Image (cartoon, grey):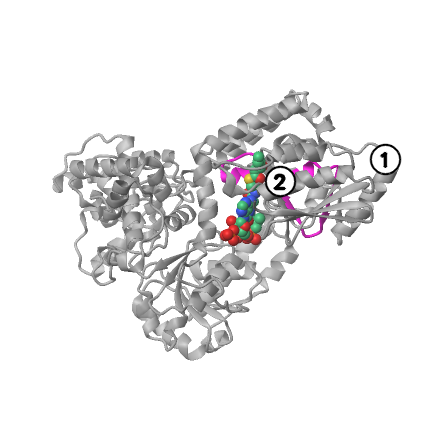
Amino acid sequence: MKGTVIYEVKDGVALLTVDNPPVNPLSDGVRTGLHDSLIKAEEDDSVVGVVLTGNGRAFIAGADISEFGGNVEGVSLNEVFQKLEHCSKPVVAAINGIALGGGLETALCCNYRIADKNAFVGLPEVNLGLLPGGGGTQRLPRLAGPSEALKMMLTGTHVPAKKALDMGIIDGISEDVVAESIEFVKEKANSSENHPKVRDLNSKMIEARGDDKVLLEAQAMASKGRKGQFAPGQIIKCVEAAINIDDFDEGLKKEGEYFLECLMHPQREAMIHIFFGERAASKISDVPKDTKVMDIKKAGIIGSGTMGGGIAMCFANAGIPVHIIDQDEENLKRGVSVIEKNYDFMVNKGRLSSEQKDAVFGLVSSSLDYKDVADCDIVIEAVYENLELKHEIFKLLDEHVKDGAILASNTSGLDIDSIASVTKRPELVVGTHFFSPANIMRLLEVVRGEQTSDETLATIMAVGKKLKKAAVVSLNAPGFIGNRMLFGYTAQANMLLLEGALPHQIDQALESFGLNMGPFRMMDLVGLDLGWRARKLGGKESPLHAKIGDELCEQDRYGQKSGAGYYNYSEGSRAPNPAPENEVTYEKISTENGFTRRDISDEEIVDRCILALINEGADILSEGVAQRAADIDVVYINGYGFPIWRGGPMHHANAMGLDTVIEKLEKYREITGNDVYKPSEMLVKLAQEGGRLGEAPQKDDRKEKLGFEMSSVANNF
Ligand code: 3H9
């Protein structure tokens, strides 16, 4: 059994300490331990009350997520909660650290709750495609009121102790939570016969009855922030039951039914796959766990543009002083003022106090002189994509920055080995590809060069965690993981346009599938002119898939920046309006290239774009560019707007069944004659073996990795 509960009697009080490192989830050993300890405490006449706490940094991080979808052994959570709520002696939850999901639900079954001043509470089950199924949907609204409880459950926010006290979720805050809880329960045991139970508090439920406003607001919140997700609607139904059903146990029964529906829903498996996927991504299979991690006390950034500024904010937000260098005083001033404006915006929105802004913005310094980053432990170059320029910068950095410091490049596609080759410290050179806006987007692609040392990699992964990023390692190969897949996907979207579909139809079909933004809206946002200019400069002919986009550029339609691209944009607005005037161009280019435009179904649009992603992803995996399929999913969800509830493109392929994936690939290969749909060898092999996309093959079994020189992908970035 996993985990245990330590039972001690202190001063006539039974102290139950949950011990299941590192964050004390309610695994089978913990549930059994709690159940048996409560019986022991009840049977011991010398015990007057019970204090329940957690060992280490957490109180209880919730149910054991790894148990969902499998056979659960031992005492059930609901049996534990019954025992706790009906204990014959008063019980205090001494919330020593984070109390999430089933952890907070445990505390809500206790008579009293006292928290350490640094503790947090929350019901984040929605992030796993679940609802709080241990009574949380029935008890939290009784304490915090249905509106606040719904906000907490639909966002999954972690609420700090002070706010939890104001909301009525806890009864007190303490600096020495276990000792004070022991004193408190002794006093309560002596002074009162009746100890409060959350289940009996009905006033806030009765107050909310007959008024739909709270539920309607919750529905609006869910459809805005959790589009396509199943669990939010279930949570709302549970709270509706809490409000309208007098009998608490009937409400609990309803919660149980709705929980089961979530548990059986494919979104639950997909979202839990991502929970564990994000944690697995930080582990690098051939880098030993105990590899030394360097202490990063100060960071430097080269370039004060959008990316440089965003990356600087990430460090400042994590409390790490950061110095920005630019070669141009005007640019630097503008860049730093953009950072300040971003912080001011947060102050205006109430997300930051003025004091917090001063403290965090105070960590940002800037100058024009490379000497000022000499003492940094890491310097990240974030200038535009030009290999010669990056060579120059890395030579300068190597010369100025102290020995032993990491030199990183924010390149989205250039060869890290080539960049490292101009320095005397290639083992300390690494790619850190942030996504725009860097202070908001969670993805960090860490590009491992041929000579990047284990220590450098381990340090970057630790920095990623500190900056609250989802960090994923990629080998140094064209487009790394994300942009290489994106290329195949947008190329297919463009081919669909050439064959007869229209941008808004393609966007709508993919947005209905769950993507945040369709490919044509995205291309308009990024700018159609980037590839076009690069091709013009290199004297290259437009590839078939880029012919329409390049023709639009010839008409000065560059996307949002020029007010027109695939769509039209009104002054100052980012909302896309259809552009019927483009249809002549589509018709002309299609005909010139031998296509007779045809009606294309939404199903074909989604299939072809998503299959292109899956097939490229399988190649990326078979080359070992990504360590595991889940890494690719983490990249696509956190950097490219793939819906988390589908678990990422690789999980989606596994869920479809690899046989079906291959069948569809063959079908579209035949329809289009396009080799993009030639099934990846890895998919074929796995389908034959009845396997799933999982780990990358061992080094010797890998398909040869794409080289920067020969790659068609590289030419298109
Ligand atoms: C629930 O409670 C349902 C109930 O309502 C109803 C049931 C009927 N289980 O994130 P970290 C592991 S649903 C199992 O790196 P941090 C994690 O995988 C649950 N394992 O640390 C990792 O393992 P490894 C609701 C868990 O300090 C290690 O612990 N609760 C669980 O950055 C360290 O994790 C949640 O959704 C778990 N519940 O963050 C909370 N939690 O080292 C989920 C963690 O092998 N957890 N692990 O990779 C979290 O949000 C964060 O882990 C936490 C700590 C904030 C607690």
Among the two numbered marks 1 and 2 on one chain, the one whose residue lies closer to the N terminus: 2
Determine the secondary structure under disc 1. Answer: loop
* Residue holding disc 2: 31
**Does dot 2 land on a helix, a strand or a loop?**
helix
In the image, residue 309 above or below residue 26: below
Span highlighted in magenta in the image: 106-132
User: Residue 573 at what x, y percent from top left?
Assistant: 42, 42
Q: From the viewer's perspective, is 188 left or right of 536?
A: right
In the rendered view, would you say 674 is above or below 437?
Answer: above
Mark yes or no: residue 541 visible. yes
Is residue 664 depicted above or below 180 in this figure?
Answer: above
Instruction: Determine which of the numbered discs, if any, sits on residue 192 in the image.
Output: 1
Question: Residue 424 at x, y = what percent?
Answer: 37, 78
Front residue of 93 and 515: 93
Q: Amino acid at mark 2?
A: Arg
* Image height of 172 relative to 391, above or below: above
